[in-house]
Image (spheres, grey):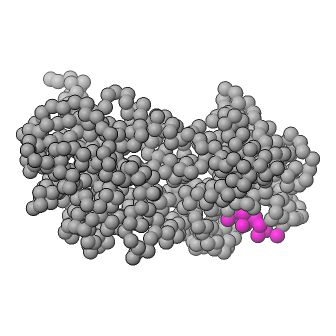
Amino acid sequence: MVPPAGLALLAALPALQAQEQADRWTVLPEGRVQRNAEAYHTRWAAPPGVKAASRAEWEQRREAVRQHVLDSLALWPLPERPDLDVHYGGEIRRPGYVIRRVYWQTFPGFYASGYLYTPEPLVGPLPAILNLHGHWAEGAKSPVVQDRCIGEALRGYVALCVDSVHAEDYYSGLTPMTIMQWDNMRAVDLLQSLPYVDASRIGCTGCSGGGQQAMFMMCLDDRIAAAVPVCLVSEFRRIIQTSFAHCYCNHVAGLLRDTDEPEMCAVFAPRPALYICLSGPEADWTQWFPQEGYPDIARAYGWLGATEAVGYRQYEWHHDYSLEMRQAMYAFMDHWLKGAPAADRAAEPPHETESVEALAALDVEVPGNRGIPAAIEEVRRRRDHLRAAPDAAPEASRAALGDLFGLTPDELSESPVPARTLRSEVVTLAGQRARAEWVSILSEPGVEVPAVLLLPDAEEPVPAAVVASPEGKGALLESQGPALADLLQCRVAVLAVDVRYTGELSWQRDVLRMNGIVFGRPPAAVGTTDLLAAVRYVAQRPEVDAKRLAVVGLGEYGALAVFAGALRPGLRVAAPELGPLCAEGRAPTACHLVTVGDLPEIVALCGPGTVSLSGVPQAEPYADLASLSRPPAQEPQPVPACLAEVAMALQGG
């Protein structure tokens, strides 16, 4: 009788054997992928500083920064402002202040929510403070957030705390910060609409994720008169690491392509700002702020003659909005919004916070509120209008796609690509002999793409197919060995490639995918870059006929094959399992793609009669495209049949 441990080993044996077989296709030495990824990250996260050297240069640069941030948020051009249609829920009355639940319309059919704290009695006009909360477990109901809102109301401010909303639709460019920022900008509309608020005296503060929202507001909304971001502002490289990824709201699509946090904060100059950061053994990433971010911000204030309006306080504390920090914020707001003498701190009046249940009981249903889908629908609609007109030249859309993916002219060229053959031997794949080369292709500076080139025995240059699978090249060569062997038998060379973040390039894949989003190099962009580099590599091989090339993307990588074909017309493209639309989530993340087009529009950019599709659940958008070699099949086409079609096309059959 086999003992339980033996049974477990037998059960795991097939998987272990499959892994061992896949490992034989490994190209890069141990540790190389991690070192390359860390160097790549360091290069892309390098802080650019403030891109100006004088007041004149800064005044020109300032608006470019704001527009870039709005565009990264998918808020450029700014959305229309529907009627606020304010609704109030329940209220809680306490000595000296009142808490009211409030709702206001930000996108058509979507309502933001928050808590409005007002002094009692209410005699205006009063200054107001927009309070933005971080990732506390109870959100706006957290005692950490209530403390400052109650303190502000007891000190004579109207305090509005906005509920944070997390939603993503990367296809349109919408990241969690998108809806939050528009809700916050419309919260300023709400405050300015209140008869007891002085519209010219509105401050803003928040800690952690709330500090991040405050930083964006400082960059985007000139109506904020004074700001105190807490435990947030640094250089992005301090929170964008290779070892972990912060909350998705930090990953605004493409933000770091043209700016960084200090420059965003400099946009706020000359308006008064107090930055609160930490020191000591429990300090967060803001411990470096006095040396790394603040000098750039202070320089912009100096150009504008407002050095007295900016400063920082550093506390030996942990990641939190402590009483001492709140007291510094009260004094700062009193000075700049009320004209009080400058002071280091101002007292927080005694108070008690409410229970989470008591605040939750203030909620009401708002008629006509369709929730998050309404906001996503509106952002998609607006961003869709940025794409080229249907009758525009394909070159314009092709250029827009290349720019969106951050591809350089060299990466879009047909010039040779640096590569190294690390070993070569004759192999047998499903009974078919071929010469195999384990190759490292330099896709972009510091990025080595591992690939295995299989060459059939032939005297003349042969066509070639570059094949990529989400499972990685090792699993591809093992699971699809017979089909690839058929290609070799038809005298077609095969390059099996690991694009980021698959196969050998899977190290920290989830973290690096998220970091790529904020770099403006999301998975679709880097995957396409790697695929195009692989095509350039096979095209330069003397054994290959560079005029007869195909790129095959299996599974969701069908989209990568289509992107590559669109950017290099003339390639034969096969996507045997292409999904319907990018918005359905069947393609690698392609931020802001709606500004260029969806998959049918991208397929149309490929050369006439070059694209083979099958397994498309929604075939109608593809049916009449001149780029298709035949009408798309709605039934999935087996990979062997797809590759047989590729072989026939490359051989002119």
Q: Which residues are magenta?
A: 186-195
What predominant SS class does the magenta segment belong to? Answer: helix
Image position, residue 36 (x, y; %): 41, 34
Which image quarter holds the C terminus? bottom left
Image position, residue 618 (x, y; %): 30, 68
Q: Is residue 417 left or right of residue 47?
A: left
In-front residue for pair 207/488: 488
Q: Is residue 497 left or right of residue 278?
A: left
Q: Is residue 134 left or right of residue 429?
A: right
Q: Is residue 635 left or right of residue 207?
A: left
Compared with 190, 513 (above or below) is above
Quadrant housing residue 575: bottom left
Residue at point 15%, 31% (across, down)? 425
Name the outermost residue toward the right: 341
Residue 546 in view (yes/no)? yes
Residue at point 35%, 40% (across, down)? 442
Image position, residue 595 (x, y; %): 46, 65
